[in-house]
Image (tube, helix red, strand yellow):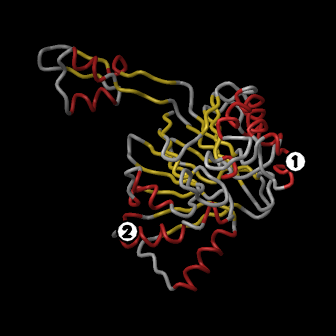
Amino acid sequence: MKIIFLGTGSGMPTLERNVSALALIFKEKNKIWLFDCGEGTQQQLQKAALKLSRIEKIFITHIHGDHTFGLPGLLASRGLQGGKEANKLQIFGPEIVEDYLNLIQDITRTYFPYPIEIKTIPADSTQGIIYEEEKFLVRYLKLFHNVKSFAYAVEEKKERKHFLIEKARQLNIPPGPVYRALKNEDRVCLPDGRVLEGKDFIEKFAQKRKIVICGDTYYSQELVNFAQGADLLIHEATFSQKEEDLAQKNFHSTPVLAAKIAREAGVKELILTHISSRYNSRNKGEVKEEDLLKEAQEIFKDTFLARDLMEFSI
């Protein structure tokens, strides 16, 4: 899996940071799950060479404009590019997301020429499973914000398998049907008399991957529990710790609070995003973006600061 950060700013876009959106790409099937869709996400997708037709699911963390103003336009453009029955799209999020899209369509007379399934989180629910398939499931957790805001955990259900193609090549095994049989861990008899066991060409990874992507939030013990053991935690860091009172007042986080959650949850890596424009290098404030990273790394060393179009593989 690979993550591309399409927008890493908060509130409004700047020359350096667009507003919130990130793409989770499943390399083996080249499908995309989009998390949030702020203004300008379409252009960011083009810069990242990602096709709208590859987006299968969109997860909205909360309804604030810097996370959703790009959604109606993206859906409309997807239709203009020839989205049909085969390009079905699923949208997940708070119950108000469905009202928002219905209202936009009614007012603008916009038609989406492909099926859209909207699955909303029950109004009285604080956590649960919102999506499940053979290989992955997605959990949600209600966060601490001034509107309903959620975190999503994408969790692998089964162990991963990797076909040792170099080993097969070194043994001069012909590609094609033989490779497919070995990938299925079947026994294969070659024309030259060799008998191969598929299991000898498979490397298994028992540890299942887990990615936690947070909407806007202040610190909560519930999020610590939710993120336990994650390979990656993506967490907002809107304000510097020097403005922690402002963060709390506005139901946002600081790098220090995000780092505490990462440390207490025992995650492997933390990426900070949703950075306020006040820390932009063009501004003359005493705190800069690099200072935000230092604040977090003093508590949790394996912290990174997201930047637009940054890629991260898991």
Q: Residue at x 24, y 22 (%)?
A: 188
- Residue 271's quadrant in the figure? top right
Q: Position of residue 260 (x, y in %)?
A: 78, 33
Dot 2 falls on a residue whose secondary structure is loop
- Left or right, 304 with respect to 49, comes to right
Front-most of 241 and 97?
241
Front-most of 252 and 165?
252
Q: Position of residue 200 (x, y in %)?
A: 35, 16
- Left or right, 265 with respect to 220, comes to left
Q: Residue at x 69, y 47 (%)?
A: 284
Q: How busy is the neighbourhood of tag 2: few (under 14 within 10 Å), some, or many (20 plus)? A: many
**Residue type at numbered disc 2:** Gly
Could you say which disc has been placed on residue 83 in the image?
Answer: 2
Give the number of marks.
2
- Residue 120's quadrant in the figure? bottom right
Give whichever of discs 2 and 1 has the lower sequence position. 2
Could you say which disc has been placed on residue 245 in the image?
Answer: 1
Outermost residue, left side: 192
Cα distance between the residues tagged 2 and 1:
46 Å
